[in-house]
Amino acid sequence: MEANARDILTKSARIVEAPIGTIGYREGGACGAYVMRLAGQSRVYKMSSSGREILLYRVAAGETCVITTTCLLGNSNYPASTIVEEPIKDIIIPTAAFNQLMLDSAIFRRFVMTNYGALISDLIVLLDEVAFHSLDARLAKLLLDAGSATISRTHQLIADELGTAREVVSRQLKRFEQKGWVELGRGHIELSDRKALEQMTRSALN
């Protein structure tokens, strides 16, 4: 990175840590800094007027937040909210320093826009899933993406991530159980037939 850009980062950037449950920003709030995630994870979500939550995406280690970048570039307020799911450690670059780096540093500018483009692509994938895929296929994909045969997640949390009601998720999971694809327990789900779930998600894409 250019010498002047390093000087700006040295003087302005700071490291911030936050525990589980911390609200990073709220919908309608002003954006005050660019964030680069060093460790931990948070989820970014949108809340409907009826109080229903839909997951937009998660920000994990090595990633940045596309909504934060959008707000900084467009000088707008946050259109969503975020909460910490795993203790986080972030590099925070104040707005003034971010704007100066975008003007002065080709390296920093390329880093920001490359990450921004990748995250926008992820959001388009999410919109495609919500608009064109059935709930059962989206639920199957969510279970598979958990990366474990045992998923410790309540029906309400799954409903929040899919942007639907808990009762709808519970009914669909019960159908999966009746087919022998999952086993339901209190606060956890066991994947019994991963191949069947994978087949459902593949069929939805074809």
Image (cartoon, rainbow, N blue to C red):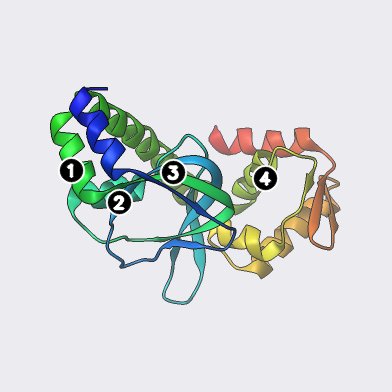
Q: Whole-Å distance between the Cαs marked 1 and 4? A: 42 Å
Instruction: Compare marks 1 and 2 and give the one earlier in the sequence.
Output: 2
User: Looking at the image, can residue 48 be seen?
Assistant: yes
Task: Residue 140: give its label.
Answer: 4
Q: In the image, is 197 to the left or to the right of 191? A: left
Whichever of callouts 3 and 4 sits on the residue coming sooner in the sequence is: 3
Question: Amino acid type of disc 1?
Answer: Asn
Residue depth check, mark 1 versus mark 4: number of the one nearer the observer: 1
Label 2 and label 3: CA atoms lie apart by 30 Å
Mark 3 is on which residue type? Answer: Asp
Q: Nearer the viewer, mark 2 or mark 4?
A: 2
Identity of the residue drawn at 27% across and 48% down: 70
Rendered view: 159 above or below 177: below
The percent position of residue 120, horizontal first and vertical second, equals 35, 39
Q: Which residue is mark 3?
A: 128
Comes first in the chain, label 2 or label 3: 2
Q: Is residue 168 left or right of residue 101?
A: right
| Label 2, label 4: how far apart the Cα atoms are | 36 Å
User: Residue 33's mark?
Assistant: 2
Q: Which amino acid type is marked by label 2?
A: Ala
Residue at 51%, 65% (x, y): give it.
Answer: 53
Earlier in the chain: of badge 1 and badge 4, it is: 1
